[in-house]
Amino acid sequence: MLNILKRWLRDRALRGDAVHCPLCARSAVAFLPSGTPPRPHALCPFCGSLERTRMMGLALRQRGLPKAGQHVLHVAPDRSLREQLRATPGITYVAGDKKEPGYTYPPGTIDLDVTALPFPSDRFDLLICSHVLEHVPDDRTAMRELYRVLRPGGLAILLVPMSDRPDTDEDPAVTDPAERQRRFGQRDHVRLYGRDYPDRLREAGFLVEVERPATTLPATDVFRYGLKADEDLVLGTKAAASPRPRP
Ligand SMILES: [Zn+2]
């Protein structure tokens, strides 16, 4: 009862039309600050989506994905995007995460090691892996696994925190959380990717395209959807299989 009252008060206070969340399809006076240090204009007050979640949601909507009949793999799912995907009629949705003691996961989330995916090759039409690889010591194996389970012609959204440095900074000897925070940006990150991140995906087999939606959308939409000006959408595809020669 208290939660219902709180939600009602919050919804009243936030009622407005300045911003719109493409994931929960609700409008508000503002997005809320989030992160450490707090970023303004980041968090959807209703579904908890962040800038990158909304960027992914918009990208999928633009492409009309996923489509009925498709298999979708969502690694370490964000709640808001998960709800949007699960609501798509006719898809097979698989969510997986590396389950750690002390954390709770949405019902149906399977325990997943991204370096050894328990799926046959060429299984998924759409694969979403956002802000995962920077936690994985052997990210090259993870990338090859993600590539393996992607169906030829399928699409993978592969986001990581990326810096402007030319090369990825990584050092397996750095295990101290405070040093990881200082050097890689978070206590449990094992590297800080640089501009060479797309090349690492290419080495795993992906055809890679990098888009920056905030530079192609009208400024009013960038504000309205609460997108980051400098956030890249990194997309990987797998070439459609060439037809087999007739015997
Ligand atoms: Zn929302």
Image: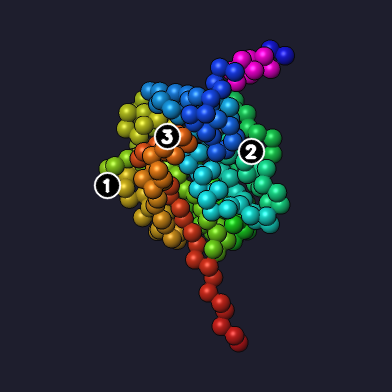
- The percent coordinates of residue 40 (x first, y second) are 41, 25
Q: What stretch is highlighted in magenta?
A: 3-11
Kindly indicate the quadrant of the structure image that contains residue 161.
top left
Q: Type of residue at label 1?
A: Pro
Left or right side of 167 for 67: right
What's the colour scheme? rainbow
Q: Type of residue at label 2?
A: Glu
Few, some or many residues within 10 Å of mark 1 (<14, 14–19, 20+): few
- The percent coordinates of residue 84 (x first, y second) are 62, 41
Kindly indicate the quadrant of the structure image that contains residue 11.
top right
Left or right side of 60 for 7: right
Looking at marks 2 and 3 on the same chain, the residue that comes earlier in the sequence is marked by 2
Residue behind mark 1: 166
Residue behind mark 3: 223
Looking at marks 3 and 1 on the same chain, the residue that comes earlier in the sequence is marked by 1
Q: Residue at the spot x=68%, y=43% of the render?
A: 87
3 up-or-down from 27: above or below: above
Circle number at residue 83: 2
Q: Can residue 27 be seen in this view?
A: yes
Q: In which quarter of the image is the N terminus?
A: top right
Q: Are marks 3 and 1 in contact (CB under 8 Å)?
A: no
Q: How far apart are marks 1 and 2 (CA)?
A: 36 Å
Q: How far apart are marks 2 and 3 (CA)?
A: 23 Å
Kindly indicate the quadrant of the structure image that contains residue 5.
top right
Q: Residue at the spot x=60%, y=49% of the render?
A: 73
Few, some or many residues within 10 Å of mark 2 (<14, 14–19, 20+): some
The residue closer to the viewer here, 140 or 217, is 217
